[in-house]
Amino acid sequence: MAPADTTSTKPQPIVISGPSGSGKSTLLKRLFDAYPDRFGFSVSHTTRQPRPGEQHAREYYFTDRDSFLALVKDNGFIEHAQFGSNLYGTSVQAVKDRQAEGKICILDIEMEGVKQVKKTDLKPRFLFLQPPSVEILEQRLRGRGTDKEEAILERLRQADKEIEYSKTPGVHDKIIVNDDLEKAWVEFKAFCVPEDATK
Ligand SMILES: Nc1ncnc2c1ncn2[C@@H]1O[C@H](COP(=O)(O)OP(=O)(O)OP(=O)(O)O)[C@@H](O)[C@H]1O
């Protein structure tokens, strides 16, 4: 008899991307509220010092600069960036750790991260959240009131690139246009929890 295929029993991660302001956080919050135990986020690596109360492997994987850069060289990161003098990143291993716990790991990442994930052996499902139009996206970013003018303009420039890339055939398994939030939620839930789609 052929050996059992244990890899197929691991929950498949879900990659959610879409322009800043397209509604990723809004829908993810609903998903986590509705299914608190089923999904998980990956824990990021950082070279910054732990703050009081922070635990290794819970808030972050705390690491030093040399180890971090060695992992970058090894293609161990899906995304990484420098903020101030510290490095931060999402590692392939962090996603596998969530899988090993039986959780569906959700990756909320931008376009370059999506391209990087496609080079790994994670084999996630890809979901793109699209704003109804760039004009509406601009209204929502302004309405959110969290960004300065320059940041809004930069987000809109980046949105054009994300939307253009999303049109590449085969990049995403599903594209949801977030026009009406309730409709988007029904589609979002159906993608993330297909077995509950009719409920
Ligand atoms: N369908 C919708 N109709 C109207 N407003 C919406 C809708 N979806 C989200 N919003 C609002 O748009 C704003 C941006 O949404 P949100 O912060 O969830 O975007 P995001 O994709 O997570 O952005 P970022 O990548 O910057 O974190 C929020 O103020 C949110 O309440």
Image (cartoon, grey):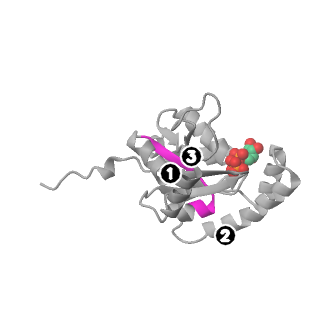
Residue at x-position 55% and y-position 55%: 66
Give the structural element (helix, strand or loop) at label 3.
strand
Q: Pointer 3 and pointer 2: residues touching (CB < 8 Å)? A: no
Q: Is residue 129 magenta?
A: no
User: Which residue in the structure is indicated by mark 2?
Assistant: 164
Q: Looking at this rendering, what residue extends furthest in the top direction?
A: 53
Q: CA distance from mark 3 to mark 2?
A: 28 Å
User: Which residue in the structure is indicated by mark 1?
Assistant: 14
Point out the image quarter for the N terminus.
bottom left
Q: Pointer 2 and pointer 1: residues touching (CB < 8 Å)? A: no
Residue 121 sits in quarter = bottom left
> Where does residue 63 sit, x and y in percent of width and height?
55, 46
Task: Mark 3 or mark 2: name the one nearer the start of the chain.
Answer: 3
Q: Is residue 110 magenta?
A: yes
Residue at x-position 50% and y-position 57%: 71
Residue at x-position 67% and y-position 52%: 178
Q: Looking at this rendering, what residue extends furthest in the left direction?
A: 1
User: Which residue in the structure is indicated by mark 3?
Assistant: 44
| Vertical order, 38 against 77 (above or below) | above
> Where does residue 180 sit, x and y in percent of width and height?
69, 48
Q: Nearer the viewer, mark 3 or mark 2?
A: 3
Task: Mark 2 or mark 1: name the one nearer the start of the chain.
Answer: 1
Circle 1: residue type? Ile
Q: Dot 3, crowdedness within 10 Å: few (<14), some or many (≥20)?
A: many
**Region rendered in magenta:** 103-113
> Where does residue 175 sit, x and y in percent of width and height?
58, 59
Left or right: 167 as drawn, with respect to 152 = left
Q: CA distance from mark 1 to mark 3?
A: 16 Å
Give the structural element (helix, strand or loop) at label 2.
helix
